Amino acid sequence: MLRILGRVTSINVRKAMWAARELGLDYAHEDWGLPNRDPKVPEFMALNPNAKVPVLVEDDFVLWESIAIMLYLNRKAGGDLVPEEARQQGLVMQWVLWQNNEMGSNWAYPLMSIIRKAPGFDDPQKVADNIEAWTGKMNIIEAHLAKSGDFVVGNRFSLADIAITLGLHRWFAIPFDHPPMQACQAYYERMKNRPTAAEWLTDATP
């Protein structure tokens, strides 16, 4: 049995679990990550010395990094969440990596300040600056979704849709004055109707 270790409030953990659900793979979930279960303990760090989630464990095979896990799950299941055609595959991975490296590069401070009320994240100017930078990234995906059709890449659901939808969920879940993003909103509503999606797009998982 596959095991996926990590807290569901982590977007990266939800990427792995949503991909597994989408591919029809059974797995056991183990809740790791603060504030529930500290990953900086020998038991966990023997699996991932970075002390970060998610981690996939299958018998004696251990894999970390959410994108690597999604790719492994797709290959293991013989899935079609990564296109075979080279250009389409490249575009899917472009948007998966963009969500990880660019779209998510400014949301930590607003999340910790507005939602989690974490000590040390109480500077309103930093909140405003990060939201402004985040909005700039959102304008990029807004322009893309306005012309891409029903999915992020091509005419079928892919790993890019998992990554981008989870990023949009965080955008819409954090209460602040959001500028209009009509294409993002329409796309997000379509993805929320996907049977495998609802579990990962809740008020409890901003």
Image (tube, rainbow, N blue to C red):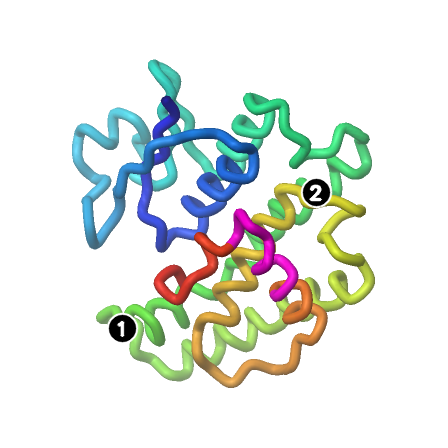
Looking at the rendered structure, the secondary structure element under dot 1 is loop
For label 2, the crowd category at 10 Å Cα-Cα, with few meaning under 14, some 14 to 19 and many 20 or more, is many
Image quarter where the N terminus lies is top left
Q: Which mark is residue 92?
A: 2
Q: Percent from the top left, x then y, of residue 76?
A: 55, 21
Q: What amino acid is labelled 2 in the image?
A: Val
Q: Which residue is drawn at 80% across and 46% down?
A: 154
Question: Is 166 covered by the magenta stretch?
Answer: no
Q: What residue type is labelled 1?
A: Lys
The correct choice, above or below, for 139 with respect to 92 in the image is below
- Secondary element under disc 2, as helix, strand or loop, is helix
Identify which residue is drawn at 57% across, 31% down: 71
> Is residue 99 depicted above or below 38 in this figure?
below
**Residue 164 percent across, percent down from the top left:** 60, 55
| Residue at image location 68% in from the left, 63% down from the top | 141
Whether the magenta-drawn stretch holds residue 193 is answered as yes
- Determine crowd level at label 1: few under 14, some 14-19, many 20+ residues with C-alpha closer than 10 A: few
Would residue 176 appear left or right of 5 to someone viewing this image?
Answer: right
* Labels 1 and 2: the sequence-earlier one: 2
Q: Position of residue 42 (x, y in %)?
A: 17, 29
- Compared to 201, does 112 lie above or below? below
The residue that label 1 is drawn on is 117
First to last magenta residue range? 189-197
* Residue 76 vertical placement versus 107 (above, below): above
Q: Find the distance from the CA under tag 1 to the CA under tag 2.
A: 35 Å
Foreground pick, 109 / 38? 38
The reply, left or right, for residue 190 in relation to residue 111 is right
